[in-house]
Image (cartoon, rainbow, N blue to C red):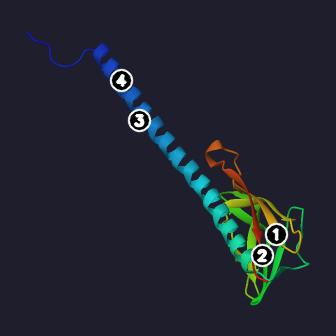
Amino acid sequence: MKRRGFTLIEFIIYIGLATFFIVASLNFVWMIIGDEIKQERLSEVNDGGVFILKKITYHVQRADEVDTQTVFDTHPGKLVLNTTGGQITLDTYQKSIALGSAVVAITKLRMIEGLNPAVDLTSDKVDAKNFTVNNFSASGVTTIRINLTLESVNPTGGATYEAENSWTTSATIRKK
């Protein structure tokens, strides 16, 4: 007479193997999700920084002069440019944002063109950790250097949400 079915030991082995493969698969999926979140945060920081520096360089190169209201060599800095179309101001301000049950204060970078309302240059997912303007002008040539550090907002301190980058660039006023 031939037996049908599994013995108890075979059944336990099959359940153990199935559990192992399910746990391994879930860990793999969780790792992929974590990497996707990390890459999203890195992109947010890097894309934001590149956009901001291009915008600042564009406006500096087309400005007539750097205004005396500009705050040099300190964080937070303030850059005020005089143009034929009016003033352009780049500065920072504090904003409280809600992330889940936590309220977090972040520093945002903004731009004000003339009498128009301020436009945020950083998203609510990014904190401007450093915005410093340095005066490198010499011999009648107006050159400024910008130091910018952006960091992903990370109220939990988890490694998945960590992202930070720093940039330094300079721009010279071309108009005369």
Q: As drawn, which residue projects farthest toward the front?
A: 139
Residue 65 % position (x, y): 83, 80
Density class for disc 4 (Cα within 10 Å; few <14, some 14-19, many ≥20) is: few
Q: Are marks 1 and 2 in contact (CB under 8 Å)?
A: yes
Image point 40% across, 26% down: which residue? 20
Image point 14% across, 13% down: which residue? 3
Does residue 129 lie above or below 17 as drawn? below
Q: Are marks 3 and 4 in contact (CB under 8 Å)?
A: no
Q: Using the numbered discs, state the Cα–Cα distance from disc 1 to disc 2 in whole angstroms.
A: 6 Å
Does residue 157 lie above or below 126 as drawn? above
Q: Which residue is mark 2?
A: 173
Density class for disc 1 (Cα within 10 Å; few <14, some 14-19, many ≥20) is: some
Q: Which residue is mark 4?
A: 17
Earlier-in-chain disc, 3 versus 1: 3
Q: Using the numbered discs, state the Cα–Cα distance from disc 3 to disc 1 in whole angstroms.
A: 55 Å
Residue 169 % position (x, y): 74, 61
- Amino acid type, callout 3: Ser
The quarter holding residue 89 reads: bottom right
- Amino acid type, callout 1: Thr
Earlier-in-chain disc, 1 versus 4: 4
Q: Using the numbered discs, state the Cα–Cα distance from disc 1 to disc 4 in whole angstroms.
A: 67 Å
The quarter holding residue 102 reads: bottom right
- Amino acid type, callout 2: Ile
Residue 16 badge:
none
